[in-house]
Image: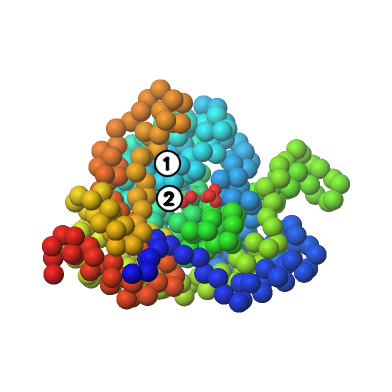
Amino acid sequence: MSKIPLSKCFINAEVEEAALRAIRSGQYILGRESQEFEKELAAHTGVAQCVLGSSWTMIVYLLHQLQGVGPGDEIIVPSHTAFPTMEPLIHLGARPVFADIDDTYGMDLAHAESLITPRTVGIIGVHLYGHPLDNDRLVALARKHRLWVIEDCAQAQGAKYKNRMVGSMGDFGAFSFFPSKNLTVLGDGGCITTNLTDYADRLRMLRNHGRQGKYDHEFPGYNVRFNEINAAIGRVMLRHLDEFNERRRQIAARYSEGLKNVVQTPPVREWATPVYHMYVVRAEKRDELQAFLKQKNIETGVHYPKPNHLQPGVVGCFPFIPKLPKTEQAVKEILSLPIHGEMTLEAADTVTASIREFYGKK
Ligand SMILES: Cc1ncc(COP(=O)(O)O)c(C=O)c1O
C-alpha cells in the first residue's frame, strides 16, 4: 500500500510558474511580490496591516521588542503548543507563565486569568490544531487586566471565530508559512497582522536594519526580511487556502463519523470554523496504535509529546515549574492523523479502517 503522509505540500504548474516569475524579475527581497502578498494577507485576514518576516519566531521576536517586553515581565501562554510560541519572549528576559488546556486543547481561559499578577503584560492565545479559542473571552480578559493579546495563528490560517478570521481580533495575529502549515511558502516565513498601523510601520523598519529610505537608518534593526520567490509562491497558495481548508473539514468530518466510539475525536465549539491543521484523537494504547499504523504505511504524529513547561530548556530557566494536569494527561494520549488540503476521502477511510482494525471493531 502506498504511504499515507501526515501532511503534504501543494505544488502545481501555477506554483512553479510563480517561482519562475520571481526568479526572472531580477528582484529577490521585499519587492513587488512581497508587497502584494502583504496586502492580500491583510485583506484575507480582515485587518489593515500585514508585515512579513523570515519566520513566525523572528517576526514575533521583533514585535515583542517593539512592545517593550523585557526582564521582570510575565506573559501568559499555554504549555501545550509548539516550543517557538514562547521562545522570543524568553530571549528578551521575560518569563512565560504556563496555563493548562481545555478539552479542545486550547488554553483554559479561567486558569489563564487566575495566573495574572501585577507583572503580567500580555497573553498569547494559540489557536492550536486550527481550532479557534473563545476570542471574545480572550480579548475581554486582556482588556479587563490591561494586557496586550497576540493570537498565535501558526496552525489556524483561515479559521474563523463567529465568522471573523483569526488574527483579526487580538492586538496582533502571528502566522507561520513553514511547509507543514495550512498556507506555506515552501520555505520558512511568517507575518504579523494588525490594525495598529504605527506598530506595522516600525516593524517594517525593524525587520530591515531600521531603514526608512535606502541609506537612512532611524534605529538599529535586524535582517528578518522576506524573499520574493517565497512571496510569489505564497500568493498562489493563498488563492487556494479556503478550498484546501474546506477539504480538511471534509476529511475531519469523515474521520469523526468513522471513529465515533473508537477513539476520542476532537470536539468543535459552536463559535468555531476550524481548519484542522491537525486532526488529533485521544487513543488508548496510543504508542501501540501508532506503531500498528506505521506498519500499514500510515504516518502519524504526536503534537507534542513533551509539554513546554517540562522541556529542559525551560525547566533550567525558571525556578517554579507548575503542575498542569490536563496537559500532562493529554500528551500521553494524543495522536495526529494524516490530513492535508488534497487528501482523498478514500485515504481517510483507509486510515479509519486501520484504526478500527487495531481496536477489533468491524
Ligand atoms: C503554534 C506555533 N507557533 C509558532 C510556530 C513557529 O513558527 P516558525 O517555524 O515560522 O517560526 C509554530 C510552528 O512550528 C507553531 O506551530
Disc ID at residue 77: 1
Tell me which amino acid carries mark 2. Val
Label 2 crowding class (10 Å Cα cut-off): few <14, some 14-19, many 20+? many
Q: Position of residue 295 (x, y in %)?
A: 29, 58
Horizontal relation, residue 297 to residue 234: left or right: left
Nearest the eye: 266 or 3? 3
- Residue beneath the point at 50% across and 65% down: 9
Callout 1: CB less than 8 Å from ligand 1: no
Q: Position of residue 57 (x, y in %)?
A: 56, 45
| Residue holding disc 2 | 126
Horizontal relation, residue 139 to residue 346: left or right: right
Q: Position of residue 278 (x, y in %)?
A: 38, 59
Does residue 335 appear in the picture of this structure? Answer: yes
Please, is residue 219 above or below residue 193 in the view? above
Is label 2 in contact with label 1 (beta carbons under 8 Å)? yes
- Residue beneath the point at 32% across and 76% down: 346
Whichever of callouts 2 and 1 sits on the residue coming sooner in the sequence is 1
Please, is residue 327 above or below residue 74 in the view? below
Label 1 crowding class (10 Å Cα cut-off): few <14, some 14-19, many 20+? many
Tell me which amino acid carries mark 1. Val
Alpha carbon separation for disc pair 2 and 1: 8 Å
Q: How many marks?
A: 2
- Residue beneath the point at 42% across and 41% down: 77
Callout 2: CB less than 8 Å from ligand 1: yes
Q: Could you tell me which quadrant the C terminus lies in?
A: bottom left
